[in-house]
Amino acid sequence: MPKQYEPNAVEEKWYSFWEVNGFFHSEPDERESYSMVIPPPNVTGVLHMGHMLNNTIQDVLVRRARMLGKNACWVPGTDHASIATEAKVVQKLRKQGITKADLSREEFLEHAWNWTEEHGGIILQQLKKLGASCDWQRTRFTLEDDLYDAVIDCFIELYDRGYIYRGKRMINWDPEAQTALSDEEVIHREVQSKLYHVRYKIKGGDNWVTIATTRPETILADTAVCVNPKDERYQDLVGKTAIVPVVEREVPIIADEYVDMEFGTGCLKITPAHDQNDYEIGQKHGLEIIDMLNPDGTLSEAAEHYVGEDRFEARKSIIKALKDRDQLVETEEISNKVGYSERTDAVIEPRLSLQWFCKMDELAKPALDNVMNDNIQFHPAKFKNSYSHWMENIRDWCISRQLWWGQRIPAWYYGDGAEEYVIAKTKEEALKKARKKSGNDLGENDIRQDEDVLDTWFSSWLWPITVFDGFKNPDNEEINYYYPTDDLVTAPEIMFFWVARMIIAGYEFRDEKPFSNVYYTGIVRDSQRRKMSKSLGNSPDPLKLIEQYGADGVRVGMLFSSPAGNDLLFEENLCEQGRNFANKIWNAFRFLMMNREEGKEYSSPLKIDEDNLADRWMLSRLHETVKAINSDMESFRINEALRKVYSLVWDDFCDWYIELIKADEPGAKIPEDKLNRGFRIFEELMKLLHPFMPFITEEIWQRIGDRDTKNAMIVAQWPELDENAISETDSDLFSAIQSTISAIRNIRAEFNVGPKAEIDLKIKAKNADIASALQDNEWIFRKLQNIGTFEVSTELKKPSTSASAVVEGSEIFVPLEGLIDLEKERKRIEDEIDRLKGFLKSVNKKLDNEQFVENAPEEVVQRERDKKDDTETSLKKLNEILHELE
């Protein structure tokens, strides 16, 4: 058996064993189901730290469910990620000298499928390295035929119910991806911008009016100037005409209460085609709409100037022109929020566009009610507030995307009119509907399908339903057995993208919630609180972490500092701590194995020695922890559950219990009855650890006994709670003994008494019951300390020249006469006291200096205050020790 735990030699072996023997696969049966769907990573994706955290938590939940005897089903899969994947394919083609415009839709999709087959699913293979126990036989992809069809059926069903409509509205436009985005796909960032104050001439006189704008290039599309009707500064201008700079367009000056009199100059330029609020004002006042931008963000012919220039280059050009015309009054530095594309990071342009929308207000009601009444529970519950705010103010969802990769919208056009279309799944069906609607004998070439695809989230909102074929066959055995799923683990930043929409879809299409619990993970950040990302270069390679620290070590490291909903401040030493824990477990296991007779099997049920406090305490601690972990897991306090089992294994079992079952004679083996109990307790600990550290626990489990596949750790029974085994009395007594022994160790350290030196121990117990209990367990003190005489009484007096301590009301005395050179020890302590007094004097001198305190950085002053506190504490302790020596 290797001296150190070797994860690289273990992980592939056991993962293959689990997979080959079908432990991950689930089929409906008579057991209670436990089902969970993976948040499908982009097919373009590779493993990053966020995936590591999210999937570790999911794996902990599903492994524990298996051990509880449930039929656990964790469905994996990937998302086709329309924008991201299409961008990757376009980039690849560009390197080959091919543009998207060079290809037909069918040719482009062939390239996209080839790219997906070559690169797609890499992340799922990487998840296996982490130990993710997904049912890989159930792997789904959002663009596979059945899931594709389900999305189209969903669109048609919602359209028929009156929820989907086509309209020209102001939308978010991504000029880089050249597609519409929903509101949720826009990230608003606080940035430093410039506010340009520009003069507009009033027609028919020498008057001017000044407006303020952060987007001067949109001046070219202005169709009005607007003031607040209550603003006395501009009341005489309402109804007059202003002349737009550069284009010299005459536009009306109108009044609307929307205008904030306090912002800028209190006078707004109105550009209905390029601002949502301006659009609404334009509709209200019947203003002309001028669209001055091409889809790629360059200026169109409608701009009349700078045609073909990029929008930001055009901004520079128009600023220069305004300066030349003496119409740029001033430039002001401000902070404002700018929208960026969640996918491409391009600055979003508000754009008037004909798109497909889904009405959300009525659809959202059941989804809001069933989260607020805890039919679906959020962990932590604080996220209900932001959820309710969004749902109560939900806007219609722009579901069309100007892309080719995705589910193509099943709309078929037979004319140029806005309403000359039909909704149908196939061309044949569309032709019949078009003939009927138009009254014309149309041919196949007279109809054409919409070029756009549906928003990626329009497929993933059906994920918990479609992975079990609940659309194609709504009453099939699997959807009835596995749906609703139990838990969802995801990040709060996709609460509105995905979680809310899945809940909406669940109630709309199955009249049932899609899951019972949503566990929100935090964001993985570095020590400077920056989100980990490749672009910042602050994110380690997850696979290299696994290679260095082992999958179990990395899992423990990530979970240790990851309470639900709070960000994880990741440092690599967390993984090192996880690896050290694995080595601690391995060393305890090796010690037990070294004491086992060759070929000996220990398989009897756990039965302790009722007369042995250490046994009773260890059993009590085991069941206390089982009870606490069960509560933590049910409340999704997963990091707390891990901390409890960590403490049980490291502190209680390794540091105390193993020491107490060792043979009394040096070099002798542990007595067989004690060894058997040690193995049985250790096995229960491995069961508690398995969801968190699956590889090392399976390795140890299989080495302890000759187990067949039916008895593998992955399907071992979760430790059954025995409330009767929990003894507060035994726990308190053993805790008092632990504290006493720790105090003795501290005394040895303070007076430089080595562990091999024999000491006399006298304990003045606070009452007769404690005195009796300590006396009955004298063997524990002798087992863990080299003790000569051992005396316990309620009447003891402090011996002269002795070290003392107080533990839970009882006093401990260790006579020092003859144990140490008293004079030499006094001299050493007095010298140390003198040194610390001198040091304290220098620190106080600094702190008494008002100039230093007022002018030095706060952290420097605080360091000096900390030095003072630490030194004063040390002096107090040393004076107490010196007193003991008198």
Image (spheres, grey):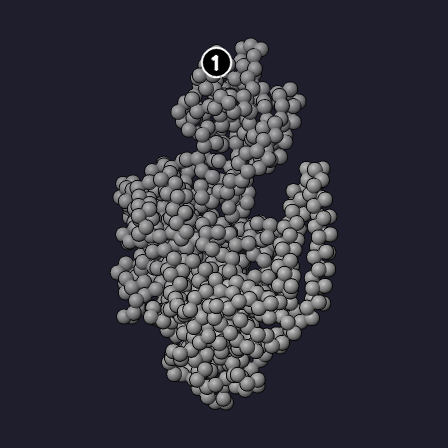
> Helix or strand or loop: what does disc 1 sit on?
loop
Residue 885 shown left or right of residue 73 in the figure: right
The answer, for residue 519, to whether it is visible in the render is yes
Give the residue type at disc 1: Glu
Name the quadrant of the N terminus. bottom right
Can you identify the residue that label 1 sits on?
A: 232
Which residue corresponds to the image point at 47% horizontal and 55% vertical from the top-left? 563
Circle count? 1
- Residue 622, compared with residue 457, is above or below; it is below
Q: Which residue lies furthest to the top in this view?
A: 205
Residue 420 x/y as whole percent: 34, 39
Residue 747 shown left or right of residue 76 in the figure: right
Residue 713 x/y as whole percent: 42, 75
Name the quadrant of the C terminus. bottom right
**Camera-side residue: 342 or 456?**
342
Q: Which residue lies furthest to the bottom in this view?
A: 598
**Camera-side residue: 522 or 830?**
830
The answer, for residue 318, to whether it is visible in the render is no
Which residue corresponds to the image point at 55% horizontal and 38% vertical from the top-left? 190
Residue 800 x/y as whole percent: 60, 67
Residue 713 shown left or right of residue 330 in the figure: left
Query: Which image quarter: residue 744?
Result: bottom right
Q: Callout 1 environment at 10 Å: few (<14), some (14 to 19), or many (20+)?
A: few
Residue 522 x/y as whole percent: 48, 52
- Residue 402, compared with residue 136, is above or below; it is above
Which residue corresponds to the image point at 47% horizontal and 24% vertical from the top-left? 260
- Residue 217, compared with residue 739, is above or below; it is above
**Camera-side residue: 147 or 122?**
122
Which residue corresponds to the image point at 28% horizontal and 58% vertical from the top-left? 474
